[in-house]
Amino acid sequence: MNKVLLIIILVIGGGAKAQLQVGPKLGYNYVSVGYKDLPTGIATPEAQGAGFHIGGFVQYEAVDNFFLGSDVLFSSRAYNEISITNEQFESIHMKRESFGYYSTFYLDIPVFAKYAINLKARKYGTDKFLCFYGGPMPSIFLSGSGRVQETTRTDLYDQTTTYQTERELSKSGIKERFKLFHLGVHAGLQFSLDFGLNFDVRYTRSVTSINKNLTEEGNMSNGMIQLSVGYNILAD
């Protein structure tokens, strides 16, 4: 009786291991920031940049070829923000240029449902899976830094006056700009090999604003294209 019970436990445990996938993941972020509902007279800034992500993933095969899971990723998002505004008051022309650099760090937790298609060419070939996945992605703001340079040029008849300021944003100042939490969605493709290595391309977009001051800055949103490589440590 004890031997039968032991065999059952080993079979169930082996099946659970086969259905469970766990491992590290790291990769590159291409970052873009969108703006809408800006105050009247404020030009729409341009903001792009890059970063990286590192962390891990876990997923479970609920039924054949259908997985539920999540990543937990430390994510860096650094970008330049450029805004140029021109104003005309009769004979006075005023041009304002703002150049900002922001480096922010988040904890991203993309939750997903995934469907896998086996691309194995023959009965005894190597398993290769093409996976489609998506779901919600909560993001928690951890820390950041920033620097802003502002230049104002005033032209009056034949005279030009230029005034320039530069300021560093403290950790407390950067936290005043960005929300502690925002929610996004994500969708992606994964190519997975049977020995555990996998490659991802994913697009993410925040659906709630990432900034606090909506009155002066409008509604800011985050978009990212992520390229990742991961490894399932439980692969046979």
Image (cartoon, rainbow, N blue to C red):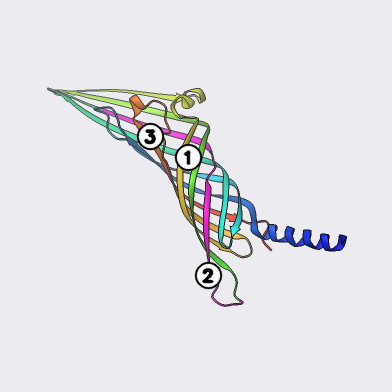
Residue type at tag 3: Met
Q: Earlier in the sequence, mark 1 or mark 3?
A: 1
Q: Is residue 162 left or right of residue 171?
A: left
Residue type at tag 1: Arg
Which circle marks residue 116 in the picture?
A: none
Q: Is residue 192 magenta?
A: no
At label 2, counting other C-alpha atoms closer than 10 Å, the crowd grade (few under 14, some 14-19, many 20 or more) is some
Q: Quadrant of the C terminus?
A: bottom right
Q: Is residue 6 left or right of residue 120?
A: right
* 3 or 2: mark nearer the eye: 2
Q: CA distance from mark 1 to mark 2?
A: 34 Å
Residue ID for mark 3: 220
* Displayed quadrant of residue 7: bottom right
Residue depicted at x 52% and y 35%:
140
Residue ID for mark 1: 77
Q: CA distance from mark 1 to mark 3?
A: 14 Å
Element type where label 2 sits in the image: loop
Q: Earlier in the sequence, mark 3 or mark 2?
A: 2
Q: Which residues are magenta?
A: 96-124
Residue ID for mark 2: 119
Residue 40 image point, x, y percent: 24, 27
Pointers 1 and 2 in contact (C-beta within 8 Å)? no
